[in-house]
Image: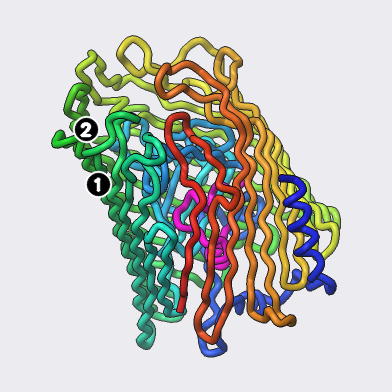
Amino acid sequence: MLKLILIILIFISKYAVVLGNENKSYEENCLWDNQSNIPCLQITSSLDNSSPISYSSINKTIITKKQIEQSGAVDLIDILKSVPDINITQSGPKGQQASLFMRGSGSNHTLVMINSIPINDQSTTQGLHDFGVDFIQTVQQIEIYPGSSSSHFGTNAIGGAINIILTGDYKNSFSLVSDNNLNYELSGNKTIVNNESSLNFKFGSIKNETISVRGKSDDEKDGVQNFTLNVNYEKFINENTKFFNTSYLRQTIAEYDNSDSNQSGYEGDNKMASFQFGLQNSIYNKKNDYVIYLNTYDREYDERGTIDSYESNVIGAKYIFSNNLNDQISFGFGSEYKYDWGYFDNNGSYSASTKGNIDNFSIFGNIGWEPFETVNFSIFTRRDKHKLTGNNSTFKLSFDKSFNDLNLGISHMTGLRNPTLYELFGTDNFGYSGNRNLKPEKSNTYEIYSNYSINENINFLLRAFKSNIKNNIEYINNQYQNDDDNIDLNQSGINNEINIKLENNSIKLFSSFLSSKKENNSDQLRRPEKNYGLIISKSFKKSFLKDFNLNLSYNHYGKHFDTHSSTFSTIEMDSTDLIDLKLSKKINNSNLFIKISNLLNENYQRPHGYNQEQRSIKFGLKY
């Protein structure tokens, strides 16, 4: 494997003779695939509880539309698997349930948002987000905020937050992809501009059927179909004020297996909708945002005629203000109210149900101070009042200092997760009853980080953290309870990235070293101690391969512990080495490409007992 990587690096570097300038103007960077008559737009997002000066101290990873298209990603997992802070397991091929562990925390400790609006599904047992049902055809940008982000976004962001940006795209397009299994991917984008307004439509449709989730290679195949629609509307009332609306509809229908010998007749139908309406007023460095939103989930699982139903809804309103007091101080504040309600009814040999509602009101504020040009202090605070858990406060303190090409920083942050509807109100046929006296889980994190620019083409990023979670909610004696033994769950780790930008060429190398422990100091399941990989992008501009692009990603997912799918004992899982390769050629207004996933045809399960896709070859056209 290392020999293969070295050969690829040598091949790529052979064509990188002249070093480019990373600090190009915004216009040059923006025109990555535009025509001269198409507006050049910068995608921005509204980060809760921040202001211009404090925003610079927030650690984040931004994945742009260009990077998404270069990778040939199909779903969110394809993108997030190359982020050093994240580990993912999926119960089978695409469309199956997937869990994400950020910085070693639980799968319900990551807050997921659309345009900074939380979308975690309260009808799930622990309020986690299923990443396996989200596909990426209408996504414009993805933002990852590692570490507790509760002071910015609210509850659930103990391990971190992921923000999915859905905005209009002024470049009309249509894409068709098929593969050697006769699966397909369709997507399209159309924008209508009229005076001071724009209306944008995006759609995506996917059919994927490759292998059996839990059976043998010659068993029946389990497929998935996804349909996604995103509508974005903007209307400028005057030069400083605009009205905006984002509507997102998604349905994912996936077949699944009950066991390796019980495979047919099982299907999940997962529907989700999100509607956001807002007003934004911006004058120089002063900004006001008013947003109201509605999220709804409707999930059904057909187990050979037995129907399990899950529904949840949230309606909310949010106000955010930020301003620069002067060149050295910025501040912001805001408030949010949201009301959650939902139920689920699980039938069959195991029956469970829940029905209830909760609400939460929060106020937040921040101050950013730059006493000197190279020094930044930031303070973020938030107070949430929950219907059952009462008042809870979180905060974040950050300090960073620049030394020429080196930036150093340190942060202290706290987080919390409030109990879910099921943990509060649920019941089942084994005697479980909800616990309305639950307290929120709370976290405490320290982080140091650095960013060193070796020259204008190479930079090195390093993050080290140590965190603990107390009051963790556990299932004890037929009830969820807060653990009261004063022993915390502990996580620590070091992540680093090396980014190299050459002429028509970029290389990213990343690694992660993680320690995530249970209360007895044994390793948490499905959290590898080490991950590493690289992403290479190469454009051929001057040779006979003009307008030809190569993109390669390599991921090493380290050894880890898991639960055996039959005996339920703890076992060690071997590491995996996965390579994806995409080759594309631009011809006039079209891009032709071929992508090979799992190039080496690695045969593996993650988690144990659930098959993962083998090598696939896709052919595509984007016009």
The N terminus sits in image quarter: top right
- SS of the residue at dot 1? strand
Q: Which mark is residue 269?
A: 1
Q: Is residue 128 above or below residue 275?
A: above
Is residue 57 left or right of 474 when viewed as pictured?
right
x and y percent of residue 11 in the render?
Answer: 77, 63
- SS of the residue at dot 2? strand
Q: Is residue 344 above or below residue 351?
A: below
Magenta-drawn stretch contains 70: yes
Q: Nearer the viewer, residue 268 or 279?
A: 268
Magenta-drawn stretch contains 90: no
Q: Looking at the image, tell me whether mark 1 or mark 2 is earlier in sequence order.
A: 1
The C terminus sits in image quarter: bottom left
User: Visible in this render: residue 160?
Assistant: yes
Q: Is residue 239 above or below residue 550?
A: below
CA distance for labels 1 and 2: 23 Å
Mark 2 is surrounded, within 10 Å at the Cα level, by few (under 14), some (14 to 19) or many (20 or more) other residues, namely: some
Magenta-colored span: 62-84
In the picture of the structure, the residue carrying the numbered disc 2 is 356
x and y percent of residue 461 in the render?
Answer: 74, 49
The quadrant in which residue 483 appears is: top left
Residue at the spot 34% in from the left edge and 65% down from the top edge: 230
Under mark 1, the amino acid is Asp
- Residue farthest along the bottom direction in this orientation: 37
Residue at the spot 42% in from the left edge and 34% down from the top edge: 610
x and y percent of residue 143 in the render?
Answer: 54, 54
